[in-house]
Amino acid sequence: MTEPDPSTAELRSINPYDQSEVGRVTVTPAAGVSQVINRAHQAQPAWGTLSLEQRRDAMRPLGKLLRDRADEFARLITQEMGKPINEAKGEIAATIGGFDHELDAIVEAISPEQLDDGTTKSTIYYDPFGVCACITPWNFPVMMIHWLVVPALMAGNAVILKPSEETPVTAQRYADLLTDLLPPDVLQVVHGRDDQGKALVAGEVDLICFTGSREAGKHIMASASSGLKRMILELGSKDPLIVLEDADVKAAARFAAGNSFRNAGQVCVSTERIYVPDSIAGPFMDELVKASGEIVIGDGLDEATALGPMVNAGQRDHVLKQVDEAVAQGAQVAFGHTGHHHNFVMPTVLTAVTHDMDIARTETFGPVACIITVADEHEAVDKANDTEFGLGAVVFGEPEHANRVARQLNAGMIGVNKSVGGACGAPWVGARQSGYGYHASRDGHRQFCQPRVVSFAK
Ligand code: NAD
């Protein structure tokens, strides 16, 4: 969490566990964002005309730099936003694991392509757009930046990063590693709140890469429309978990606990709704409650902690309000929802949740597992699909059966008996209002580029 220091133009980053100061960054005045954009435009042509291999080689040392500082980054993430240290270490490991391969995969994806149909010979070039704004959230303070900034730079764009105001110190430290490897102004950082993000989107940028809430995404799309600016939006969701009658109930319940409470539920692909048939609802709930009771709550820096504080009081209050409203409307507390202090929300299991409750429709982003019982899988699919979101979904059941159900779900990424993450090379993609454009994968890497086709008659 952060708060402005009115005496200086700084954001003070505050540890949500003990309210100690983690660090400070200098805020970029919103009125000064256009100068940052101008500098990026001046720096971009030289960077964009380097060969892909030269850009790759310039960026390659980032992997080792991050690996050497993995523990330092993990600690900083935990201090800035409360994530348990083991999850923070996991975030860094996932960010840098396969980095060399990732760079090579980008080179392969956006190298020129030759086409020849017998009468015409064409070359497709994947050129930079120019200046790219990367606007990122706080829940994965390094990974979310890395996912956007690396392909944007590799494509030859100059990048202006506007990291979340909640985790600016981590963002600046990551950016410092990368800027040292790049020519001046190829990567710049703008710090501040949504005003700085809005100024960036409204400015003379050519591509906007945004990860964050659907509401901000809509605002960005509206603002970008006057210039028909290109954009990639990765937005929020309300991911369902469907448990089929032939599922391994214990494994499904363990998954539900892990994926509802990980990072205190502050994950875009958290399990936010659980559809369980009446016939197995009892044993499923018992297992889920048991798993919830095993979660160690505390300071994220303690290795034993599995659930730390929410990122800030606003997020805590949003979650508690949704739970209170659901309980007032008839939901039952099977576990948790007691003894909240500071920025914590206890892991909570709700049963008798109904489809019309706000907690079943609006993103919670908190450690709450909501069980909605259904008569059969058809009702589960209908209800799972009855949402404007569509980032991820998970189905637990006999694999072939679960696969048939998975193919009926209107989400971008669906896990069968596992989380949503795809094999190396798969896109990170949302359906419906969870995303617009996407990244990772060959086609995802190409979205950071303007294709140009040069053709000759044969
Ligand atoms: P947020 O939308 O509040 O803020 C994200 C970033 O956008 C911040 O840097 C913020 O300052 C900036 N911003 C806010 N309003 C803006 C505007 N109108 N114009 C330009 N910039 C603006 O989101 P958050 O609270 O930081 O992150 C949580 C959200 O992000 C959740 O909804 C979560 O599901 C989503 N998320 C999605 C993915 C994904 O891959 N789809 C990944 C992580 C998080």
Image (cartoon, rainbow, N blue to C red):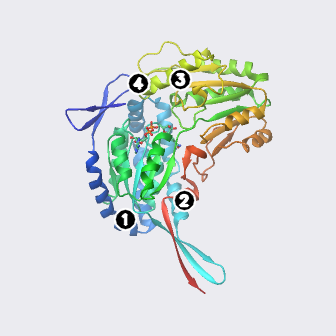
Under mark 1, the amino acid is Trp
Return the residue at label 1. Answer: 47
Point out the frontmost of discs 1 and 3.
3
In which quadrant of the rendered image does the N terminus lie? top left
Instruction: Using a 10 Å C-alpha cutoff, classify the residue at mark 4 as few (fewer than 14 neighbours), some (14 to 19) or many (20 or more).
Output: some
**Disc 3 residue crowd, few under 14, some 14–19, many 20+, Cα 10 Å:** many
Q: Residue furthest top?
A: 339
Q: Is mark 1 within 8 Å of ligand 1?
A: no
User: Mark on residue 313?
Assistant: 4
Question: Could you say whether the residue bearing mark 1 is in a helix, strand or loop?
Answer: helix
Number of the label disc, if any, that sits on residue 322:
3
Which residue type carries mark 4? Ala
Q: Are marks 2 and 4 in contact (CB under 8 Å)?
A: no
Residue drawn at point x = 32 percent, y = 41 percent:
192
Q: Nearer the viewer, residue 218 or 183?
A: 218
Q: Is mark 2 within 8 Å of ligand 1?
A: no
Q: Can you say whether 53 is above or below 145 in the image? A: below
Q: Where is residue 214 drawn, in percent x and y? A: 50, 41
Q: Earlier in the sequence, mark 2 or mark 4?
A: 2
Q: Going 45% across and 54% down the picture, which residue do you hit?
A: 225
